[in-house]
């Protein structure tokens, strides 16, 4: 129903479940024009600090309580992946649109159920692939669509971080396959999978080799040893026949970066983003054409104020994602990156996990 003439609809209400990476969603949705009405985390004291910092009125320790009390129009699911399916089902069946963080789930079965549940509820759903939105990556995608590299021959990438490079770094649920589903592939490699799919097309088959940096360390809060990979090398073939290779590692001293290079019959594009320089969130892009050297491509970064890293990350890379979700809810554009994109990436993750365990090539289901 449309509002009476002369009146505008209130900004949509948003609730965020999980305030690890989910904290970045709070300023992102506020910058996109939504009202963040509640945040939820088991550590209620920590949640109250986040709420106070951003003027969020309500805090809950349990997501079930929050959904029942608030009935938000949009729910951000930013919990450990093993909880995504049950939360998404409850939120969408209650009428909420969904933005689910990556990886979409811990298994193909759960990822398919998430897509089906949101579709059944006739809600809009998207996956949190925020790294599509740096200016340099947006430009890379546009140039690929224009055909500047010609037929893609090979793709090479890396996604490196130092967060757990030191053995003394405390473990989290991310080291526990039962809660996370995947290690570095779920943390970082899934973004690389998405960017390759988004720019070059679908994966046909993969093989992989994975490792754990400190396998004797127990997962925090459990008696179990670390069993989710800290680094993984993947080699793959796209449906087009192009070759793909990349490394994802959360145990790379001195690194906080990702890069993607696409080479084809007419030229090549090279993208790089490191979070250790001013206006890092724009990224950088180079183009080589007709056998010539790489030359920089101009990109225009957004204006993002602030010094808090999570706040800047949210406003720079998640606000465009949030704005796209709001537009899709209004019927003004596609829900892209969709939950189906999250499912397609999940299929590659599952194939890579099997390939690493069996040391074979594994076909990615169509």
Image: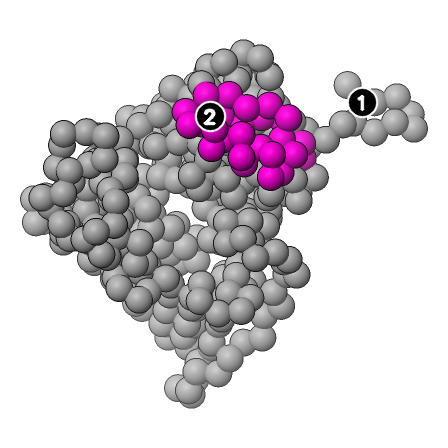
Residue 236, percent from left and from top: 23, 56
Which residue is located at x 53 percent, y 30 percent? 48
Which residue is located at x 25 percent, y 50 percent? 169
- Can residue 157 be spotted in the picture? no
The quarter of the displayed image where residue 161 is located: bottom left
Mark 2 Cα-neighbour bin, 10 Å: few <14, some 14–19, many ≥20: some
Which residue is located at x 76 percent, y 27 percent? 10
Between circles 1 and 2, the one closer to the viewer is: 2
Q: Is residue 125 above or below residue 1?
A: below
Residue 226, percent from left and from top: 15, 40
Q: Which residues are magenta?
A: 34-61
Give the numbered dot on residue 2.
Answer: 1
Label 1 sits on a secondary structure element that is loop
The quarter of the displayed image where residue 232 is located: bottom left
Side of 80 where 40 appears, left or right: right
Mark 1 Cα-neighbour bin, 10 Å: few <14, some 14–19, many ≥20: few
Residue of label 2: 44
Side of 66 where 256 appears, left or right: left
């Amino acid at each position: 129903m449309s509002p009476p003439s002369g009146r505008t609809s209130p900004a949509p209400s948003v609730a965020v479940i999980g305030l690890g990476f989910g904290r970045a969603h709070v300023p992102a949705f506020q910058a996109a024009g939504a009202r963040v009405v509640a945040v939820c985390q088991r550590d209620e004291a920590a949640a109250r600090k986040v709420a106070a910092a951003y003027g969020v009125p309500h805090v809950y320790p349990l997501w079930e309580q929050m959904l029942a009390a608030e009935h938000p129009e949009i729910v951000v699911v930013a919990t450990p992946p093993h909880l995504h399916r049950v939360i998404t089902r409850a939120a969408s069946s209650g009428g909420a649109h969904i933005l689910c963080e990556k990886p979409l789930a811990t298994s193909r079965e759960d990822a398919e159920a998430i897509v089906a549940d949101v579709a059944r509820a006739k809600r809009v759903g998207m996956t949190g692939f925020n790294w599509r939105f740096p200016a340099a990556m947006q430009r890379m995608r546009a140039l690929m669509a224009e055909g500047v590299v010609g037929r893609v021959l090979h793709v090479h990438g890396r996604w490196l971080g130092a967060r757990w490079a030191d053995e003394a770094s405390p473990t989290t649920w991310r080291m526990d396959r039962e809660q996370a589903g995947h290690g570095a592939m779920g943390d970082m490699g899934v973004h690389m999978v998405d960017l390759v799919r988004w720019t070059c097309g679908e994966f046909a088959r993969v093989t992989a080799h994975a490792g754990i940096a400190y396998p004797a360390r127990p997962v925090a809060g459990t008696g179990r040893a670390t069993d989710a990979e800290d680094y993984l090398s993947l080699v793959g073939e796209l449906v087009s026949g192009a070759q793909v290779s990349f490394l994802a590692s959360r145990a790379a001293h001195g690194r906080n970066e990702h890069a993607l290079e696409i080479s084809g019959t007419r030229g090549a594009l090279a993208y790089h983003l490191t979070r250790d320089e001013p206006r890092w969130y724009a990224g950088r892009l180079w183009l080589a054409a007709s056998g010539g050297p790489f030359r920089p491509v101009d990109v225009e970064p957004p204006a993002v104020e602030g010094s808090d890293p999570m706040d800047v990350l949210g406003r720079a890379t998640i606000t465009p994602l949030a704005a796209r979700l709001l537009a899709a809810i209004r019927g003004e554009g596609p829900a892209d990156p969709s939950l189906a994109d999250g499912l397609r990436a999940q299929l590659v993750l599952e194939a890579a996990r099997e390939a690493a365990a069996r040391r074979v090539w594994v076909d990615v289901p169509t």
